[in-house]
Amino acid sequence: MKSKVARIVSSALALVVLLILVAGCGAKEEPTPTLSPTAEPAATAMTEEEATPPVVLRVGSTKPYKTTNKFGDYWYGVLSNLTTHDSLIKLDTDMKPTPWLATEWEISPDSTRFTFTIADGVKWHDGNPLTAEDVKFSLEYYRDKAPRSGWMKDVIDTVEVDGNKVIVNLKKPYGNLLTEFMTYAPLPKHIWENVDDPEMYEGSDMVIGSGPFKLEEWDETAGKFTFVANEDYFQGKPNIDRLEVEVFSNMDALVMALAQGEIDVWWDYSGEFPYTYVPTLLKADDIEFASATFLGVPAAMGFNLERYPMNELAFRQAVAKAIDYEQIANLVFHGYGTVPSYGFVPSTHPNFNSSIPTMAYAPEEAAELLDSLGLQDTNDDGIRETAEGEGLVLTFLVRSDKPSIVRSAELVASNLAEIGIGAELNSVDSSTWVATKDEMDYDIVFFRATPWGTMMHAGHGSGYFDSRRTGAGVLHNLDAREYLATCDARLSTALPEEQRDLDLEIQELHHEYLPGIALVWIESVYPYRTGWDNWVIDHIYGGVVNSFSWFQVTKSSE
Amino acid sequence: MLSKVVRYFIVLLVIVSLNFLIPRLMPGDPIMNLLGEEAFYGSAEVLEELRVELGLDGSLYAQYVRYLGNLSTGDWGYSYLYMRPVLNSITLHLRWTLILVLPSIMIGASIATFFGALAAWYRKSRLDVALSSMFLFFYSMPHYWLAMMLLFLFGFQLDWFPLGKVSGGSSGLPYILDVGWHMVLPLVALTTFKASYDFLIVRNSVVSIYGEDYILMAHAKGLSQMTVLFKHALRNALAPLVTVTAIQFGAILSGTLLIEVVFSWPGMGTLIYEAIGARDYPLLQGAFFIVAVCMLLANLIADVLYTWLDPRTR
């Protein structure tokens, strides 16, 4: 009886082991599954037509893609904006609006009427032409049906079509319309006009756009998107014939794949490349780096202006002087960081206010400011007390999903301890962070500003502080009338000179009111394999993988 | 037998109710997660519309009743993380977890049984010391670290195996072989971990049987060492292993998260972790329900197996 069981078990074991071995050997011997004897006659026909092999770019990403629905899946939405879809305009490397689907535009003097001329000869991937009607439909569709486009309901009144022109009439002046339109892709009216719940739509035609690539396949279990070049693209065929996006669950595997040559380049829309992996890539052969000053702020802190003593400007100034910014730049960001200024956003932004002073580590001045506020250490326990005798221990609300933010918060806590301010770190997952932040249940909150986030609202980071803005990532903590009025003024004008003055003013107001402090500005690095040249950097979409690169990048033959 | 089934059913009902309540007690709003970090939604009405669309409106009790009603008709709900019915996402991920977990449990238990028995039989010999040290070494290692080391050594340095995922994308027989090739490293990681745990259990169990009378009788009858060990001793020693394996089966459905992350393996662990982060209540309820059912099933099978293995409990 027992030996029968033993026999069954050992034969099952042997079978499994054998299967694995065969799988291992078998899979190794076959280079690609598509190479079969029947493919050879076709191969000989091909070699007569094209001497050059197809240009294939393999991109690695760690984002959690779930569907190929632009509305339902936030991450696919971003990816599709670079590949299968176009926008009316794009921002180039110098952050200037560049014509794309809209060849030209006119703004009325009071910034309430925008007229876009739509390019000729643009076709959807299914062959139907892209017309001004599609653009009008799309704007109205986003306004009425997409929950993320809430701002459009307040701003856009009507949309008209006049030949190949689309005229957008606004309820109020909105100078940033061009920038906002950078993220909205016109949709085919003939597909979406019958769809009431865009997020839940599952039709195979939901991936159809007008962009430089068509989605050929989304293999969910293999974690791979395959895009093919759109030969009929209105700007001409992209330099890349095949674009493969490989999805990894962790950065370690992605970096190893890059070092081994299984992928060509890394892409992340809103984050910076983790510097801890740079040494591994430096050691590998054939890896090069492009770099640019990151448009966003990877680690920042904000004050709860409803609580004492954060509501005292002198206190906030003291905190700003107590932080060792160079230490954060060196320890957390491995030397790729620089000390920021009080203006909050880095110099990549247009109209950067260079007259605002850079912050500095000056703990003695910080201590003096705190003394002047009456916050002294009366009982010699190392922590200052308020006038009522309460120990000054602040609650830090920290997002735990970004390790660099957590580490920065720890360093700030130790800096503040040196001038007698205690800190309790409350490190939570992002959902809890959002809920706690919106309830204002913190003294100091640690967050990050994404590249697009710093452009939102009136720009230059105002989207994070204006108390009227709602959103998962924003602080909405500053309600000073001067600040809100300046943001409104900026939004109401489309004239470049007025915009410049107001941009400078907004940064100056960040210095004056100090609703938040940037902890570091960084040089973001974008690794890629040797052999690929002429990348274009797009500050909004993250590095070298973007719509501009598709038409500039070249692969030298090996 | 029937009373056992009824008992299990009541347990399942309690579990379903707890699975409904506990995720909703977590702070955080699933709607905010859905909209994303940079979205500006403007007004509370928009949020309310989304809430109704996703079935998150109304009181907790109303949602509970709705959930139970739907569940009894086979409607597991709609996942807003995946934007598709919960059952679809779960079956997809469950498949990959089972493909990894079932072989690793079987192989791990077999390895542990064989070596555990040997080590116990020749205990305190050099073989025993070598085996026990080796398995203890693997047991004390964090399993995800072992997984990362395997990936780094065999996937990166030696380039013998792929750097994760389930396949490179193909179909037919090449697909099955491709999956097998991708499976090797995560399977080795999981099996090592399980075998090392089971080994200690088997070894201790056999050692405790060593002094029994019937073993002495078998020796007196003139049977060889191996026959006594594998035919008589092992059968009685296997009962604890069966219990442990049943419990492991339930735990491992959700507990392989770290291995899945290392190997980019789309299993249940990843599903549950992402569902928690996104506060996707329907998906969490569905996933926990499956885990509970599998766990209870495994326990039921263990109960039955135990009585078969050990007639004294009949």
Image (spheres, rainbow, N blue to C red):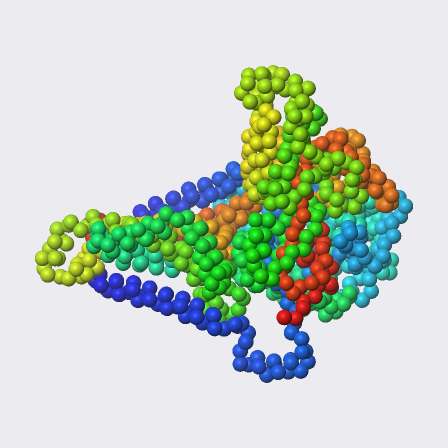
Left or right: A193 in relation to B102: right
Q: Relative to A92, is A447 above or below? A: above
Q: Tell me the quarter of the image containing the C terminus of chain A.
A: bottom right
In the foreground, B141 or A491: B141
Q: How many marks?
A: 0
Q: Relative to A4, is A169 above or below? A: above
Q: Relative to A26, is A520 above or below? A: above
Name the spot of residue A36 as percent of width and height, x first: 53, 78
Name the spot of residue A415 as percent of width and height, x first: 60, 31
Left or right: A472 in relation to A127: left
Name the spot of residue A346 as percent of width and height, x first: 72, 43
Q: Residue A356 occupies which quadrant of the picture?
A: top right
Q: Is residue A322 visible?
A: yes
Name the spot of residue A395 as percent of width and height, x first: 58, 30
- Residue under the image location 47 percent in, 50 percent down: B258
Q: Is residue B28 visible?
A: no
In the foreground, A335 or B205: A335
Q: Residue furthest left?
A: B220
In the foreground, B213 or A411: A411
- Residue under the image location 59 percent in, 19 percent down: A377
- Residue under the image location 66 percent in, 32 percent down: A361
Q: Residue A98 occupies which quadrant of the picture?
A: bottom right
- Residue under the image location 62 percent in, 47 percent down: B34
Q: Relative to A517, is A144 above or below? A: below
In the foreground, B115 or A121: B115
Q: Tell me the quarter of the image containing the N terminus of chain A.
A: bottom left
